[in-house]
């Protein structure tokens, strides 16, 4: 048990050195890293493995040391170790790039139109199957520690978990009020360290004769960014220029340009410039090995009101040239429209229920859902 705990500490203790790339998962504007660390501490292959699933919120794909061009020259030796000793899935994507819908999909393995969590206000349905429930029924000990961000009017422990630690909304980088098995308490200190501590404490008190599933939901690196004191100046001397694609918006839908000064835009408060969340349109799309197609339904069943997007991923991997309006690509556009319609139909998404597109707005979102 002591050796097992020391192994776990080496992966979980330091948030900068933390972990990551058993799986790489696209989450819209960024890549989130999620670790499905199969900690096979059992000595024989026929014994059941322990499972640690770690989600780092909004982490970019290049914010790891093993990347071919690491962001800011970042050093992540423990993450690199996982990547080297494990498996990397560089073409795995979430299907809804919002906090709550993506978490519900991780837990259930289903689309948002199946699990029903379509926004950041809806709780995970109590009657819906999840992988922790499956493991719990088969005798595993289960724990969730960290950001949950699904339905926050109820403090009760969620189905599938023996141990339950979370908080409302995004939490705070310092001194977050946590919900520990239904009881609220302020946990002093830096978020990443305290979440790690609580996960390790649970590991130290569990029944060592039974296997476990541990899910850790980190808040960092979700903005607005507040680094731990010992790290706050480590990149002060490194320039961080805007990428060319930040301003090369020719051919992009108008809503992309309209949201620049809003909450998630590059001129918005998330990055320290202005004080005014966008309302992003509904998004539907399909991706093949070589192509990507995106459309933005209004939500009323009527015609599209935003320009579609079509990209040749082999010739244009950064998606800089939208081909949707070019005559010679109309056959491909029609092909992928049909593929999207077929996927919606076959996956049970019709009728496709979604909110009415409210357009781009400048007011701030309610704080707990930012």
Image (cartoon, rainbow, N blue to C red):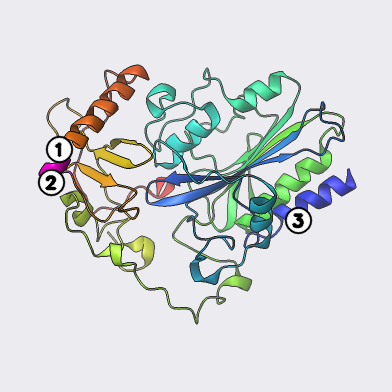
| Of the pair 116 and 179, the residue shown nearer to us | 116
Q: Position of residue 120 (x, y in %)?
A: 40, 38
Q: Which residues are magenta?
A: 324-330
Asked whether 326 falls inside the magenta stretch, the response is yes
Quadrant where the N terminus sits is: top right
Query: In the figure, 118 relative to 175: above or below?
Result: above
**Disc nearer the start of the sequence (3/2):** 3
In the orientation shown, which residue stands out farthest toward the bottom?
Answer: 237
Asked whether 138 falls inside the magenta stretch, the response is no
Mark 2 is surrounded, within 10 Å at the Cα level, by few (under 14), some (14 to 19) or many (20 or more) other residues, namely: few
Q: Nearer the viewer, mark 3 or mark 2?
A: 2
Q: Is residue 257 left or right of residue 173?
A: left
Residue tagged 1: 330
Q: Secondary structure at mark 1?
A: helix
Q: Is residue 87 left or right of residue 26?
A: right
Q: CA distance from mark 3 to mark 1?
A: 53 Å
**Disc nearer the start of the sequence (3/1):** 3
Q: Position of residue 39 (x, y in %)?
A: 75, 40
**Rendered residue at 27%/50% (across/down):** 278
Query: In the figure, 114 relative to 367: above or below?
Result: above
Q: In which quadrant of the rendered view does residue 156 lie?
A: top right
**Rendered residue at 18%/31% (across/down):** 334
Q: Is disc 1 in contact with disc 2, using a CB cutoff of under 8 Å? A: yes
Q: Which mark is residue 300?
A: none
Q: Position of residue 263 (x, y in %)?
A: 31, 56
Q: CA distance from mark 3 to mark 2?
A: 52 Å
């Amino acid at each position: 048990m002591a050796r097992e705990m020391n192994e776990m500490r080496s992966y979980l203790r330091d948030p900068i050195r933390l972990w990551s790339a058993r799986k790489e998962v696209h989450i819209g504007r960024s890549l989130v890293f999620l670790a499905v660390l199969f900690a096979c501490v059992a000595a024989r292959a026929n014994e059941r493995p322990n499972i640690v699933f770690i989600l780092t919120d909004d982490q970019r794909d290049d914010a790891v040391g093993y990347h071919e061009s690491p962001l800011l020259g970042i050093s992540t030796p423990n993450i690199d170790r996982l990547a080297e000793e494990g498996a990397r899935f560089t073409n795995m994507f979430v299907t809804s790039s919002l906090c709550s819908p993506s978490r519900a999909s991780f837990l259930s393995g289903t689309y948002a139109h199946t699990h029903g969590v379509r926004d950041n206000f809806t709780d995970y349905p109590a009657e819906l199957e999840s992988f922790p429930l499956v493991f719990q029924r088969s005798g595993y000990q289960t724990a969730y520690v960290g950001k949950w961000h699904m339905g926050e009017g109820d403090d009760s422990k969620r189905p599938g978990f023996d141990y339950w630690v979370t908080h409302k909304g995004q939490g705070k980088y310092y001194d977050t009020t946590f919900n520990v098995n239904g009881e609220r308490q302020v946990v002093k200190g830096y978020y990443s360290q305290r979440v790690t501590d609580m996960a390790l404490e649970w590991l130290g008190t569990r029944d060592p004769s039974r296997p476990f599933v541990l899910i850790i939901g980190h808040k960092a690196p979700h903005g607005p960014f507040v680094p731990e004191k010992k790290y706050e100046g480590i990149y002060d001397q490194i320039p961080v220029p805007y990428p060319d694609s930040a301003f090369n918006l020719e051919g992009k839908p108008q809503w992309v340009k309209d949201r620049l000064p809003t909450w998630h835009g590059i001129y918005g408060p998330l990055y320290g410039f202005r004080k005014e969340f966008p309302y992003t349109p509904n998004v539907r799309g399909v991706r093949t090995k070589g192509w990507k197609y995106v459309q933005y339904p209004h939500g009323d069943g009527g015609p599209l009101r935003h320009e579609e997007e079509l990209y040749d991923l082999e010739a244009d991997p950064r998606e800089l040239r939208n081909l949707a309006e070019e005559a010679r690509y109309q056959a491909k556009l029609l092909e992928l429209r049909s593929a999207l319609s077929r996927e919606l139909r076959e996956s049970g998404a019709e009728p496709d229920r979604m909110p009415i597109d409210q357009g781009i707005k400048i007011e701030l979102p309610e704080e707990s859902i930012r």
